[in-house]
Amino acid sequence: MNYVLATANQDKVSELVKILGDDIQLTARPRWVPEVIEDSDSLVGNARLKARALLGATETASLADDTGLFVDALGGDPGVLSARFAGEGASYADNVAALLDAMAGMENRRCEFRTAAFMACPCGAELWVESRLAGSIAGHPLGTGGFGYDPVFLPEGGGGRSFSEMTPEEKNASSHRFRAFSGLGILLRFHTHP
Ligand code: ITT
């Protein structure tokens, strides 16, 4: 089975190769395929937009994902807008700083990462899985690894460490993306696409 991935980020491609296994071949998004405007109000909606656009451009079965950090005390923010919580073009550090500011003095730090993983096939089939990983927001950044909100995300069962304090293997074996794509991998093995 061969799929094209909506991301051109080589680190994400390698991570997904490990999660999905050797019998599912993945190709990174060709550079000539333009990025999609992710303007849906749901993760599944955005993942669907990316997968359908890629399928239209390449006529190959396409995989896409979308992730958000949902914080209880902020009414679910930053949610689908996680990549630009501190504004358009914000860096990871800007977003982390904006999150810590928004949560200053708050006792309830509960949150979850959610990831939608989506497959669109030329035969018309669409398969998707949405997964969650519960955790809490640290009072300040901890550790140097990972990306995005990793320095302030303390996964449940992680012994109080942030994702940035874990090895990539440790994070990837328990992450929201791992859960979503291992679920999607099961569905892909049942789908016999042309
Ligand atoms: P692509 O569509 O090109 O994959 P994106 O920036 O939209 O890139 P995601 O949907 O995966 O990527 O994630 C949205 C934001 O959520 C991202 O910019 C990060 O700030 C954050 N994020 C996603 N996965 C994360 C992770 O594993 N650890 C920490 N933060 C993460």
Image (spheres, grey):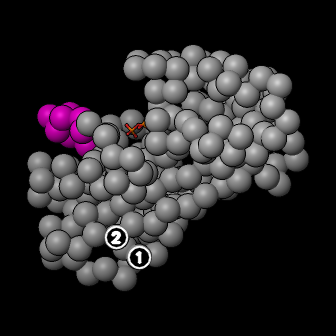
Q: Nearer the viewer, residue 145 or 53?
A: 53
Q: Earlier in the sequence, mark 2 or mark 1?
A: 2
Residue 131 locus on image (x, y percent): 55, 61
- Magenta residues, as a range? 29-36
Residue 19 visible in the current orientation:
yes
Q: Nearer the viewer, residue 177 or 20?
A: 177
Query: Is residue 35 rendered magenta in the image?
Result: yes
Q: Is residue 19 left or right of residue 112?
A: left
Corner quadrant of residue 89: top left
Which dot marks residue 127? 2
Q: Amino acid at mark 2?
A: Leu
Q: Residue at x 28, y 48 (%)?
A: 50
Corner quadrant of residue 144: top right
Q: Residue at x 73, y 28 (%)?
A: 103
Q: Residue at x 18, y 49 (%)?
A: 53
Q: Is residue 90 left or right of residue 125?
A: right
